[in-house]
Amino acid sequence: MNIKVVMLAKKIVTLRLKMFPVSKASDQLVSETGIVHYRAKGQYMITQDELSEIERYYDEYLGGSLRLFTQESNRIDASKVSSDEKSAKGGVFEALLSIVPLCELHLTSGVISKDIKAIISVPFESLIIDKIDKLVVIENSELLVQSSRLMQTLPNEWQTGTLLVYRGHGESQKQIKSLLESLRSKTQVGFYFDYDLSGMKLINTLMRYVDCQASIITPRFTNEQLKRLTSKINYAKQYIEGTQLLTKTYDSDVDFEKVIHQTTQNLLNSELSVTQESLVAHDIELVSNPLNWNETG
């Protein structure tokens, strides 16, 4: 689903249009809603009942009134109407580790309170590693900006005593790897990435730096429900790397690769590609599944 389709639906419902031009957006609208329609001379024609069905469908999808819908201002909100978070704007963090503390953050320069409600950007060397009990690595930086909203959807075990950290890009990715390598054996790590093939590949790579108990955080919803949030474009782009990852992890005797393989297989079988922003925007319930507990327990 995309913003153009939703705005078209709003126009049709608001103006009570029983006839509208055939286009990519209207084709998608008709397909998504499953309404009964007639098509002639480049126009879709619908009845009063179908108008009501369009409004009901998008009211339910948006979790609010279609008539009151406006263009969203950030990637989290935009994910309600776009399966591709890249189509919305969001900030990107540079070389330092970017952290939102849900507990006290211990630095060489002092302690930062969990109540600060801010993104803390620090070099890896400033962290007191022995004070880290739980760490959740986040794929997309926008979720740190929306951390209070994210926290409400995290599994209970990760909502307190946790540091949220952006997985980084460029130089900061090196610091993430150093951080993961340095964690105590009793520290718990959670990986919350896009529920897609690229996300699984990233987690599989980062797990090679982990020597403590780790989990993967994924949606609880059924595959059919997740298909409504899936970006077909992203899935198609990631298909080849997904099949390569499936081959790479096939018949592995490493615990975390078995989990990655199973999850990748599910994504391929159901053709799923759902961004974190979409999961948070739609308040999708998340669950935490062990990656390597047999090896570290």
Image (tube, rainbow, N blue to C red):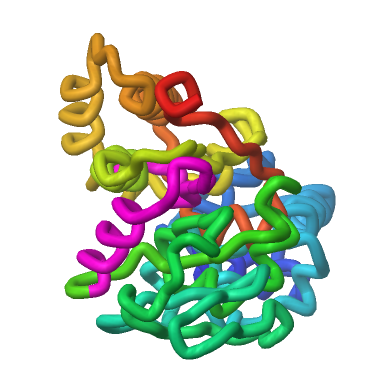
Residue drawn at (41%, 30%), measured in percent from left and top? 267
Picture quadrant of residue 159: bottom right
Residue drawn at (60%, 84%), measured in percent from left and top? 112
Depth check, front residue: 1 or 158: 158
Q: Is residue 40 above or below residue 265?
A: below
Picture quadrant of residue 90: bottom left
Q: Is residue 101 above or below residue 21?
A: below
Q: Position of residue 162 (x, y in %)?
A: 62, 60
Q: Position of residue 152 (x, y in %)?
A: 74, 60
The total of numbered circles placed on residues is 0
Q: Can the viewer see residue 5 in this picture?
A: no
Residue drawn at (57%, 29%), measured in percent from left and top? 223
Depth check, front residue: 20 or 148: 148
Q: Is residue 275 above or below residue 198?
A: below
Q: For residue 214: magenta?
A: no
Depth check, front residue: 154 or 43: 154
Q: Can the viewer see residue 256 in this picture?
A: yes
Q: Position of residue 108 (x, y in %)?
A: 44, 83
Depth check, front residue: 50 or 25: 25
Q: Is residue 67 above or below residue 191?
A: below
Q: Position of residue 217 (x, y in %)?
A: 55, 42
Residue drawn at (68%, 77%), measured in percent from left and top? 114
Where does the magenta region start and end?
172-198
Left or right relative to 260: residue 146: right
